[in-house]
Image: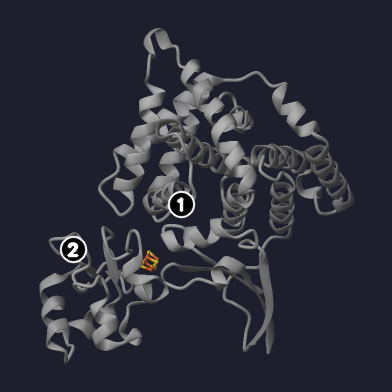
Amino acid sequence: MKEITVIEPQFSTKFQCIGSACREHCCSGWRIALDKPTVNKYLKSKVIDIRVIANNSIDIIKKNHANWGIVKFNEAGNCAFMDDNRLCGIHAKLGANALSVTCATYPRATTSYKTSTLKSLTLSCPEATRLLLDSPDAMLLDEQKLLQSGFNKSPQEQNVNKLLNLMSMHLINASGTQVNHGLYAIALLLLFAKKQGSEVLNNSQEIESYFSTLIQDIESGEIKHKLDSIASNNQLQWSLLLRLQAYIDANPNTRGLRRLRHFVKRLLYIQVQNIDNNQVSENIVRLDNVWNVKVQPWLEEHPHVMQNYLLYRLYNDQFPQDSVRTPLSWLYLLTAEWYLIKSLIAATAELTGEINKDDVINIIYSFHAVTTHSPAATQAFFDEIDKVKVNDDISLIYLLK
Ligand code: SF4
């Protein structure tokens, strides 16, 4: 038998679907793909209602085994199998075992390495987002050992990535409500690791010592001092926000988009006020002031909200992923997305006069509903970042000011 380490954040272990009470049901607005056995099961079901709906409402696409059919929406824009009480007709009439893999597992997500399995939830589910933002302990990681007949059929996790991931999570933890300080410290850590190159693990004492210095610098205010001493680049901030918003606005209609656009409109309203003569700085400064005066005091009362979100992203995205992109470019993407979410929150606080957890949940879950399930969205965000960045990825620091 082989031993596998199974890791799961506490908010994920607590998840239960709230069904018809959900603020935006996952059976609305999404094209749901069905695998081949599921399509055949529904088409040949002995339950006549299911068979009729299947024959009328499943588009057979035969793209591959996992994408054999797509469920059409009914007139209300819901999955055709959803009943009048907003409950799943398949679950009610055929039982949980008859659900497709997608429907049976959503919003649960798993990342596997040879000797470990990392469990999580996708934030496109509003209840998952609520649980993440609700508790100081949401991102505490439970760890269990599991015996199974063989190792997972995935490559082993790279030790250097594991180390950088752990250190990055500690830096965010140390930064408290000022997560921008944690992100800046991560940028410094990645630059240090880059200089070490392939020797980073052979010289692990050096990176550990540098990491300890970064923690001390966060706690002593040195990181804040360094960030404060960097000149602002309001034009870059303004351009990036506008580009990301334009991308969202051009998105084909999908689940979460209506709600996200509601918040994007508020941000756009502030961004484009009095921009004659290219005077964009005033609007960025206005957003900054709102963040400091209205949102930051609220965050002091709810210190885990932004911290949990960033800890989740580092854990769930397995930052800094193994891929052709550099760790710094992944950090730029994370920082740009955080900056957009931060600006959407600030704009709402400015125009409504208050900020509350419901607005923050709505902004985060709808952002993830629109972007997380589309590789094209990640590429589009990278493209927009490339268009505004100055020289290299380290210009992400202008978003942390
Ligand atoms: S989005 Fe989440 S809470 Fe809502 S119905 Fe789907 S799984 Fe349940």
Residue 244 percent coordinates (x, y): 41, 35
Q: Is residue 235 visible?
A: yes
Residue 134 percent coordinates (x, y): 55, 58
Q: Could you tell me which residue is drawn at 19 percent across and 59 percent down?
A: 77
The C terminus: image quadrant: top right
Quadrant hosting ligand 1: bottom left
Which amino acid, mark 1?
A: Ile
Which amino acid, mark 2?
A: Phe
Asked whether mark 2 and ligand 1 are closer than 8 Å, the reply comes as: no
Residue at which label 2 appears: 73
Helix, strand or loop under label 1: helix
Q: Is residue 333 left or right of residue 303?
A: left
User: Label 2: few (<14), some or many (≥20) within 10 Å?
Assistant: many
Q: Residue furthest bottom?
A: 46
Helix, strand or loop under label 2: loop
Q: Could you tell me which residue is drawn at 43 percent across and 53 percent down?
A: 365
Tell me: residue 93, above or below residue 185: below
Query: For residue 44, what is the image quadrant?
Result: bottom left
Viewer-proximal residue among 207 and 218: 218
Residue at which label 1 appears: 361
